[in-house]
Amino acid sequence: MTAPADSAAAQPRVKASPLQAVRGMNDVLPDEAALWLDLEDAARRVFSLYGYRNLRVPIVEPTPLYVRGIGEHTDVVEKEMYTFEDRLSGESLTMRPEATAGIVRAAIEHNLCYERPQRVWLAGPMFRHERPQKGRYRQFHQFDVEALGFPGPDVDAEQMVMLARLWRELGLADGIALQVNSIGDAPERRAHRAALVEHFERHEGLLDADAKRRLHANPLRILDSKTPAMQAMIAEAPRLLDGLGNESRAHFDRLRQLLSDAGIAFEVNPRLVRGLDYYNRTVFEWVTSRLGAQGTVAGGGRYDGLFEALGGKPTPACGFAIGIERMILLLQDAKRAAGDAPVAFVVHAGDGTEALAVRVAESLRDAGCATVVNAGGGSFKSQMKRADASGARYALIVGEDEARDGTVSIKPLREPGEQRAVAAGGIVNALVPAQARAGR
Ligand code: HAM
């Protein structure tokens, strides 16, 4: 097709300035994405060991879901949501800032817990308009895990035991510590809240502007304040843990017993409150000191009232979410290399070599062996450099001699060893251990 003379193609070219990603929303390039895949594999494996099954819910939901679910006076709802109007209907929609409310909406909509309780998980992006810094982004990713229809505390403990297993699998168990607390049930929370308001009112002169604003809307959040002048007054505030009713107390005692029985180390942190309003009784966080200010790598708890708040039947539930970017930072900190290097890199140059190179690579792939074939030509020397840079364990060399004889030369790249030639048909036997071949 020829372009009309006055089209853009005929205009003198103006160099366009390059576009950039939205602030706080990151690309994950292949070197780092390999670690993501390893983490996703490990998480998937561990979740399925405990009977948790995958489910997926939309990224965009009606805004009232989050206002009702997370709470009107939370930071997330007050200032962090990406909310917009649907172009046609004008309905207010929000990009999910977290997954629990959406999962509960889906469970109610599809009557998921009708026959039996459900253990589910999902992985995916969440969106919060926070100030970006290391470990805190505007688009971030979570593994979100929920046990729907379980009164606990057995399932609360199960989730912490499962996370401890995941940290072990990732080799990170030493760097992450568990904190637990109980924030009681609604009546205990109401009584505690009244006592808190009274305490803060008595010290109103010490409150900063944020705390004053929250005094009646969400006094619990004042306990999270970092303002130095308020710390002594906060330390003296009444503790919910001291005012738990019998049932909440028994739930928390049993949870601690189950964790001890399972050999899980934990600390009771009576000041642990979570930033979302749906929690009751058990709350927990896994924290590390290796990430600076954003040290919480996973957090969750029980939310027995959320189903009802969203129009469903009373359904007790417990869950948590892991911040994937923070886990990746920890894995990078531990210098964990991703296992995504190919086993073999095939270099080939000269007449008739390409067909053999491709055939050899396909036979290795049939045997489950990741193999990269040099693309784009180049001298043997430059191809060998690429082979080395790929991280492959072996370079497989196909030159004109090899093509003529039907052989391939194997050169180990990561360990000492001589180059040796094998018949092309024997390449799988030469590279893939007999055990692995039998297991396929
Ligand atoms: P959350 O504490 O808001 O809980 O988030 C869970 C985890 O997501 C945090 O511990 C952190 O690792 C990560 N995270 C949160 N915000 C950001 C951000 N801006 N950038 C990077 N990572 C972040 C929830 O979302 C609840 N839905 C968890 C839950 C599930 N509770 C019950 N079930």
Image (cartoon, grey):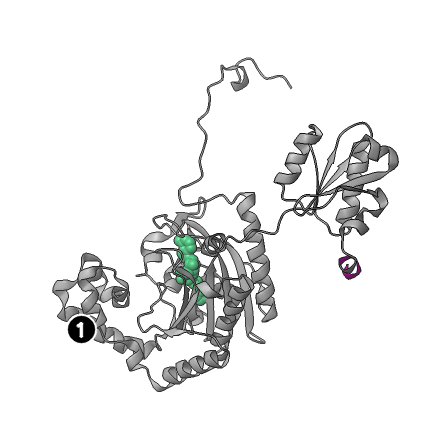
Farthest bottom residue in view: 246
Of 361 and 123, the residue lying toward us: 361
- The residue at which mark 1 appears reads as 198
- Residue 312: x and y, percent? 46, 71
Of 377 and 129, the residue lying toward us: 377
- Residue 380: x and y, percent? 71, 31
Of 367 and 119, the residue lying toward us: 367
353 with respect to 332 (left or right):
right
Q: Is residue 100 visible?
A: no
Q: Is residue 255 above or below residue 9?
A: below
The stretch of residues the image draws in magenta is 436-440
Q: Is residue 430 above or below residue 199?
A: above
Residue drawn at x 62%, y 16% is 2
Farthest left residue in view: 205
Residue drawn at x 25%, y 62% is 225
Q: Is residue 114 above or below residue 388?
A: below
Residue drawn at x 57%, y 51% is 338
Q: Is residue 86 visible?
A: yes
203 with respect to 422 (left or right):
left
Identify residue type, mark 1. Glu
Of 369 and 233, the residue lying toward us: 369
